[in-house]
Image: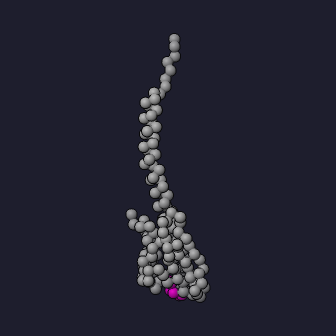
Amino acid sequence: MAKSKSAFTLLEVVVVIALLAVTASFVVPLSGRTSKNEALETFAKDLVSRLHVIQSNAYAGSGNCDYQVVFGSNGYQVICNSEVISYEYPPKVLAVGPNFSGVDNTTLLFKKGSVVPENQGYVNIENVYYVSISEEGLIEYGDNL
């Protein structure tokens, strides 16, 4: 009695490869977009945390100065007594730096002894996330999606 051999036909193999290619063409772009959104969200969360620390330092009088956060196209600087004490770069996934919309469009100021900023504003991160600073000193982030 002869054993029957089972194998795939060339047509079946081509169909399976075509289905895998079509599936991959949908999955790969979605995963790239997701990782960029995760990096943007992380940047927004880090910015909120950093602003809370700056706000707390200003309230406590740490450094005996007013704290300025100056936003630019390449990131933002934290300034105390006219001295840059840190400079933060946005993640590489950002096409440009965060955009700040405030009283003078670039600077957020926390006066010594106060949690309330001199101006309020909104940091737009690639039109995906935002960080808002209210006139009461509330700092939060959210998504624009």
Q: Which scheme is used to colour this image of the protein?
A: one colour
Magenta stretch, overall SS: loop
- Report the number of discs: 0
Q: Quadrant of residue 138?
A: bottom left
Q: Nearer the viewer, residue 6 or 42?
A: 6
- Left or right: 78 in relation to 31: right
Q: Which residues are magenta?
A: 110-115
The percent coordinates of residue 72 (x first, y second) are 50, 76
Q: Tell me if residue 90 is in the magenta stretch.
A: no
Location of residue 64 in the rendering, given as x and y in whole percent from the top left corner: 59, 88
Tell me the quarter of the picture where residue 132 sits: bottom left
Q: Position of residue 114 (x, y in %)?
A: 50, 86
Q: Is residue 23 left or right of residue 81?
A: left
Q: Is residue 48 visible?
A: no
Q: Is residue 14 above or below residue 21?
A: above
Question: Which residue appears at 43% of the width and 44% of the height?
Answer: 23
Residue at image point 45% right, 76% down: 100
Q: Residue furthest top?
A: 1
Quadrant of the drawing holding the C terminus: bottom left
Which of 57 and 76 lies nearest the eye of the viewer?
A: 76
Residue 50, visible in the rendered structure: yes
Q: Residue at x 51, y 63 (%)?
A: 93
The residue that appears at 42% across and 83% down in the rendered structure is 103
